[in-house]
Amino acid sequence: MSELVARTGRQQQRYEDGYRLIAGCIPFKYSNVEENGGDTSKNVEILMISSTSGPGLVFPKGGWENDETVEEAALREAMEEAGVRGDLVHFLGYYPFKSKTLQDEFSPEGLCKAAMYALLVKEELESWPEKIHRQRSWLTIPEAIKCCTNAWMREAVEKGFSNWHADCMIHTLPKKDVPK
């Protein structure tokens, strides 16, 4: 098996209207939770990773490059930064933000636009390219919202992920369990 390596450099980076284009995801999984009556229910957990540019937790994301689709870039970033693989199950939206550290000739103000997806995690790798720089943390949705130090990431969880997931759950409940 070949060693997994993270891409580096900006030679292939995509830009649009002064924004650096970013691809990322909110990785999630379901875990069974036993309730008082002995029944089990599924609980959603969101994966966040430690930031390399200071304290706090972030979602896997990075530059969308010319030789890949935005979906391929989001999947690559999840593997490189968080060591997870899975399926992109929903596009959560575009989230503009200003990077404090990534200013360059094509985006002198550090403007970025992140295309974010919900990623259903199917595999957690034991070893991945940024393992020595990152810690993984599985959190409940409220815990993840509290951990978001960036307003745009909080919005991606609150408005993008939570709204989609709640809507998804309503449509998958048996008819008798759907709230009126």
Image: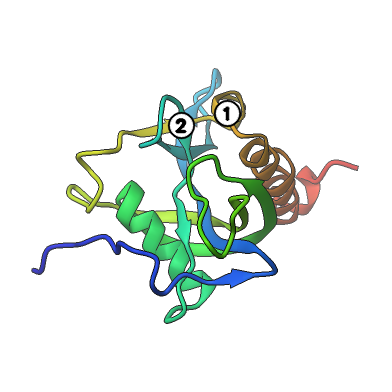
Depth check: 101 or 51 in front? 101
Which residue is located at x 61 percent, y 29 percent?
145
Residue 28 can be seen in this image? no
Q: Residue at x 20, y 62 (%)?
A: 5
Q: Position of residue 52 (x, y in %)?
A: 36, 37
Q: Tell me the residue at 26%/38% (across/down).
A: 133
Q: Which mark is residue 73?
A: none
Q: Please give left or right for residue 62 compared with residue 124 in the image.
A: right
- The residue sitting at the left extreme is 1
Provide the residue designation for mark 1: 149
Which amino acid lies under the numbered mark 1 shown in the image of this protein?
Thr
* Residue, far right: 180
Position of residue 126 measured from the top left corner of the image (x, y, whole percent) = 18, 47
Tell me the crowding category of disc 2: few under 14, some 14 to 19, or many 20 or more residues within 10 angstroms, Cα based: many
User: What residue did someone put label 2 on?
Assistant: 57
Q: Is residue 155 above or below residue 139?
A: below
Image check: 9 left or right of 94? left
- Expressed as whole percent of the image width and height from the top left, the position of residue 168 reads 70, 54
Mark 2 and mark 1 in contact? Answer it, CB < 8 Å.
yes
In the rendered view, tell whether residue 89 sits above or below residue 39: below
Task: Report x, y in % for residue 25.
Answer: 52, 54
**Element type at mark 2:** strand
Quarter holding the C terminus?
top right
Q: Crowding near pointer 1: few (<14 within 10 Å), some, many (20+)?
A: some
The quarter of the displayed image where residue 93 is located: bottom right
